[in-house]
Amino acid sequence: MNDDKKTEEFYLKLRAQLYDTALWPSEYLYKFIVITETSKIEKLKSLFNHQGAVIKTRPSKNGKYTSISVNVRMKNPDAVITKYKEVATEIEGVISL
């Protein structure tokens, strides 16, 4: 199975789970890991700009990576998934948890 098909299946499953577990609009907590580079961290923050997001960053023990938690109100599961895809497209090497 190719990566694109696996990715789409993952998002379909996530969409169903989100509809089953929350009333929308709802708060959603995104978690990402990026290499500790100011440009990547600032780019990620800018993708949630003007959405009322609460963003927390924490460097890893050795400082090579930074964990970024973004708590933001989203209107529906499709908006959650669209944002995941946007982050993956805009920030090279980002890990979404």
Image (tube, rainbow, N blue to C red):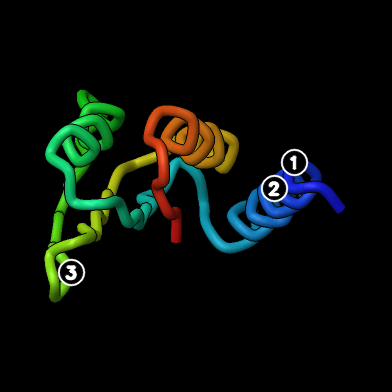
- Between label 3 and label 2, give the one nearer the viewer: 3
Residue 33 horizontal/vertical position (percent): 32, 56
Q: Element under label 1? A: helix
Question: Which of the numbered marks, if any, corresponds to residue 7?
Answer: 2
Crowd around label 1: few <14 · some 14–19 · many ≥20 (10 Å): few
Quadrant of the image containing the C terminus: bottom left
Image side of residue 7 versus residue 45, left or right:
right
Q: Which residue appears at 46% of the width and 34% of the height? A: 83
Image side of residue 68 versus residue 61, left or right:
right
What is the CA distance from the residue labelled 1 to the residue labelled 3?
30 Å
Q: Which residue is mark 1?
A: 4
Q: Element under label 2? A: helix
Q: Determine whether 22 is above or below 54 in the image.
A: below
Question: Which of the numbered marks, if any, corresponds to residue 60?
Answer: 3
What is the CA distance from the residue labelled 1 to the residue labelled 2?
5 Å
Say whether marks 1 and 2 touch (CB < 8 Å): yes
- Identify which amino acid the numbered label 1 is placed on: Asp
- First reached walking from the N terminus: tag 1 or tag 3: 1
Question: Which of the numbered marks, if any, corresponds to residue 63?
Answer: none
Residue 37 horizontal/vertical position (percent): 17, 43
Q: Quadrant of residue 5?
A: top right
Q: Which residue appears at 72% of the width and 56% of the height? A: 13
Q: Quick one: 61 or 20, which is closer to the camera?
A: 61
